[in-house]
């Protein structure tokens, strides 16, 4: 009988589950999309019940496909800054989840900036002051749901990122916990001290009684009997940190970029926290046992979203593969730049009010030029993050990639040219769920260490930069286009 770990991957547009054996082989898969909710411009919500039901059905599908094997633990990975608030006693939800992409709290952020609080927040949390993170979202819910703030002050409400919500449901309300990686994305967690901070909670007006207990990423998060006999939850990490683990980036200086809805470049900085001067994020990579490993991160808000927009809103491509074919069919973008600031710009700008544009259109512009400009935009945004990290002293020797867009050979070749470093694609690009499984395996004792668990990582293809360096001119053109959509 083959032992496997059930890895739950709750993402921005779908919930997935995979049964992964101890060699990293996928034995079973379940996946289900769920609706996105856009109440008004700049607002993005999810129905937590849809998240829950799609997660359960995906898990059952994965387990059914792996029939004959034996589940030994559950690992959970999740979209990170998205928050849910519920009644502590009944589990009743009081509002839709507010998603990481949501920009409704820009006013709160601007008020804190005017008060001069950004430096303090960055020093303690490693994060910039931006609507992206969880704290202002929690405060907004408390301020806009009738009676919620009073109930929270009385200790009647609980909140958490999606991992906490799933753990609460899986354990039938017995456990209210999160891991250090997810806690580090809230703006309420002091990443040097490793705990919720009373001063930050007061500043953001979030009662500390609402917050989950913070445990190690390979900790014990309770048991669930939802899928049969009791099964322990022994690994939890936010999706980008899980992908870092799944990419076997376990040594300082190793980096990965995941291309999903957004794109997230995370570089392991080891036991030392890097304080960025370039508006990169300092964050917790993982906490295993009592040892915390840190990372520096650049968050790009729109990557796969850009391709989805071309497909779903404009109807000019069939899918990502079609975009790659079109991009490769022309020598360049014909002077076209697509700046995908659909919900503002992330690193290194952190401009929530920027809005997207297609620039440089002429009568000779074709759909191929626009498709190429869309893929180039993801590469250029990645290169800006890489450059910022290099200025901060974090030299990139190579970049491991994963996510849906990592299947695009043309884009990865162009990426290697522009970042001037080898780009490595693994055989198994499902690194987010693999990382969750690795952490759960360590927590369950089936692996002695993450190093042992990482033995399953293998290389599919290596993309080397072209001999001729053309990055400087292309990046200069890109920056001029970005400046045209900036809010200030």
Image (cartoon, rainbow, N blue to C red):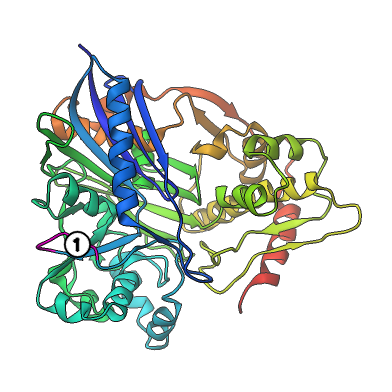
- From the viewer's perspective, tell me whether residue 91 is left or right of residue 128: left
Residue 273 appears in the picture as rendered? no
Label 1 environment density (alpha carbons within 10 Å; few <14, some 14–19, many ≥20): few
Residue 136, x across and y down, in percent: 34, 73
Residue 402 place in picture, x, y as percent: 48, 36
User: Is 336 positioned to the left or the right of 85 in the image?
Assistant: right
Q: Quadrant of the N terminus?
A: top left
Count of marks placed on residues: 1
Which range of residues does the magenta coloring cover? 88-93
Residue 420: where, in percent of width, then height?
62, 42
Question: Is residue 65 or residue 202 the one in the foreground?
Answer: 65
The dominant secondary structure in magenta is: loop
92 magenta-colored: yes
Residue extending farthest to the bottom is 115
Q: Secondary structure at mark 1?
A: loop
Q: Nearer the viewer, residue 169 or 340?
A: 169
**Residue tagged by mark 1?**
92
Horizontal side of residue 432 vs 453, given as left or right: right
Q: Residue furthest top?
A: 1
Whether residue 76 is visible here, answered yes or no, is: yes
**Above or below, 34 relative to 69:** below
Name the residue at 56% across, 54% down: 387
The question of residue 91 being in magenta is answered with yes
């Amino acid at each position: 009988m083959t032992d496997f770990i059930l890895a739950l991957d709750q993402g921005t547009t779908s919930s997935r589950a995979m049964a992964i054996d101890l060699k990293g082989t996928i034995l079973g898969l379940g996946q289900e999309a769920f609706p996105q909710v856009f109440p008004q411009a700049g607002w993005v919500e999810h129905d937590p019940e849809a998240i829950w039901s799609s997660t359960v059905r995906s898990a059952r599908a994965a387990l059914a496909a792996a029939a004959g094997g034996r589940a030994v633990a559950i690992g959970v990975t999740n979209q990170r800054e998205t928050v849910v608030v519920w009644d502590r006693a009944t589990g009743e939800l009081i509002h839709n989840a507010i998603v990481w992409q949501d920009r409704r709290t820009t006013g709160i952020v601007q008020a804190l900036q005017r008060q001069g609080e950004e430096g303090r927040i960055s020093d303690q949390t490693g994060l910039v002051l931006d609507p992206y993170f969880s704290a202002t979202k929690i405060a907004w819910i408390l301020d806009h749901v009738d009676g919620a703030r009073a109930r929270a002050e009385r200790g009647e409400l609980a909140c958490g990122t999606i991992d906490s919500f799933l753990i609460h449901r899986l354990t039938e309300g017995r456990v209210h916990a999160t891991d250090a990686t997810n806690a580090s994305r809230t703006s309420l967690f002091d990443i040097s001290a490793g705990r919720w901070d009373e001063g930050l909670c007061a500043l953001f007006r979030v009662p500390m009684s609402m917050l989950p207990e913070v445990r190690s990423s390979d900790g014990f998060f309770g048991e669930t009997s939802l899928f049969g006999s009791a099964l322990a939850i022994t690994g939890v990490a936010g999706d980008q940190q899980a992908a870092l683990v799944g990419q076997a980036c376990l040594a300082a200086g190793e980096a990965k970029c995941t291309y999903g809805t957004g794109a997230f470049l995370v570089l392991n900085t080891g036991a030392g926290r890097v304080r960025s001067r370039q508006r990169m994020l300092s964050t917790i990579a993982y906490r295993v046992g009592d040892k915390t490993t840190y990372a520096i991160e650049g968050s790009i808000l729109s990557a796969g979203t850009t391709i989805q927009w071309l497909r779903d809103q404009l109807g000019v491509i069939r899918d990502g593969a079609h975009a790659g074919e079109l991009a490769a069919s022309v020598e360049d973008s014909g002077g076209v730049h697509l700046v995908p600031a659909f919900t503002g710009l992330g690193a290194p700008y952190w401009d929530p009010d920027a809005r997207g544009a297609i620039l440089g259109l002429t009568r000779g512009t074709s759909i191929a030029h626009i498709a190429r400009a869309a893929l180039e935009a993801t590469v250029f945004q990645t290169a800006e993050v890489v450059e910022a990290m290099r200025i901060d002293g974090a030299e990139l020797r190579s970049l491991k990639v994963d996510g849906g867009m990592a299947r695009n050979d043309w884009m990865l070749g162009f990426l290697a040219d522009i970042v001037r470093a080898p780009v490595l694609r693994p055989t198994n690009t499902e690194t987010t769920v693999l990382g969750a499984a690795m952490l759960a395996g360590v927590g369950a004792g089936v692996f002695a260490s993450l190093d042992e668990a990482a033995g399953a990582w293998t290389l599919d293809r290596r993309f080397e930069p072209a001999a001729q360096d053309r990055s400087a001119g292309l990046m200069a053109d890109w920056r001029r286009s970005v400046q045209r959509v900036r809010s200030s």
